Amino acid sequence: MVGVFEIDEMALLTREVLRERSAALVAETCAWAVGTADRPHHTRRRGRLVATGTTVGVRAENGQLLGDEETGRLDLGDARPGSFRDALNMVDAEGGLYADRFDVEVLEPFVQETCALAGERLRAARPQAWEELADDVGEDPDDVAAVVRAGEWEAPLRIVAEHLVLAAIGDTPLAVVEAEGVPLSLVRAAEGIARRAAPAPPAPPAEIAGVLFLARAAVAGEPAPIPASAADRVLAALLAEGLERDEVLAVLADLPLEPDAERDLRRLAEQLPD
């Protein structure tokens, strides 16, 4: 059984670290939003996904609602037209909600990092308590990421993180949010180029053919090219076929992925344990 006191203490610590990093979370959010205004606006009408014939930015400037009234989230439905909260409730070209993409692309990795930082802080300040906590969840105390995953602090913290973002910039016009995010978005773009320039070491040639066969079989039922909205599903399918982290990274370039899908899958795979 997990010690209730230690679990609660760790949960409180993750929230404390998140509050300390709230400015960084807002900055990452603004950077993520850059370019949204230039994308075509889509909505659902009687269940059908249709393009409205204008961009998100033009629609926002005209004071028109961005969010999808048929499939949008209820908690985002009272958003001010053209605001960041309103933009999160939009559907993309594949019919997925921007809020879901935001959760996967920003909140999830940020919260994972926050929980890991909280774990490192607890381990440094109270090593005995950390070892007991690791033992309670059945993980090696030297593997902070594994302890954090086993403790399951991330899911509730994502909710807190989303509330922090919406409280800070939810009602801010999308154009203002994008403008604030431009500097950091350029940094993130440069980091992405650097990562692609130094790919993970490929699997040995004798093994890659078999790995690639399994990977292609895993995505055989997906449309080609595979959109970014399917990244989570594709990663789950690859892992279900038995591929390990380095194998996933090695085969991504050979799968029928849209550029955004490959980018998202690579980022998700890089977060997997070795």
Image: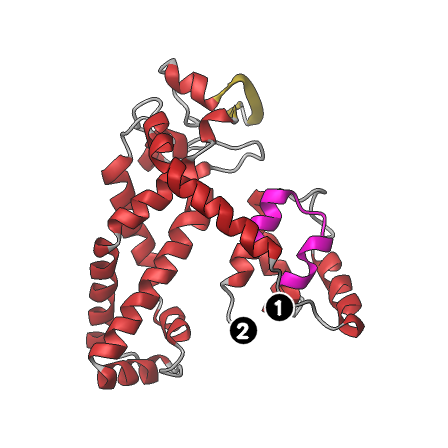
Check disc 1 and report the residue beneath it: 246
Q: Which residues are magenta?
A: 249-265
Picture quarter with the N terminus? bottom left
Q: Left of 129 or right of it: where is 270?
A: right
Q: Left of 128 or right of it: where is 219?
A: right
Instruction: Give yes or no for contact between labels 1 and 2 (Cβ–Cβ under 8 Å).
Output: yes
Q: What's the residue type where badge 1 is placed?
A: Asp
**Residue at image coords 69%, 67%:** 202
Picture quarter with the C terminus? bottom right
Check disc 2 and report the residue beneath it: 274
Question: From the viewer's perspective, is residue 267 above or below residue 147?
Answer: above
Q: Residue 243: which quarter of the image? A: bottom right
In the image, residue 176 lies at what x, y percent?
32, 28
Callout count: 2
Number of other residues with Cα within 10 Å of mark 1, as a class: few under 14, some 14 to 19, many 20 or more = some
Q: Earlier in the sequence, mark 1 or mark 2?
A: 1
Q: Left of 214 or right of it: where is 71?
A: left
Residue 262 lies within the magenta run:
yes
Magenta region, main secondary structure: helix
Number of other residues with Cα within 10 Å of mark 2, as a class: few under 14, some 14 to 19, many 20 or more = few
**Residue at image coords 31%, 66%:** 117
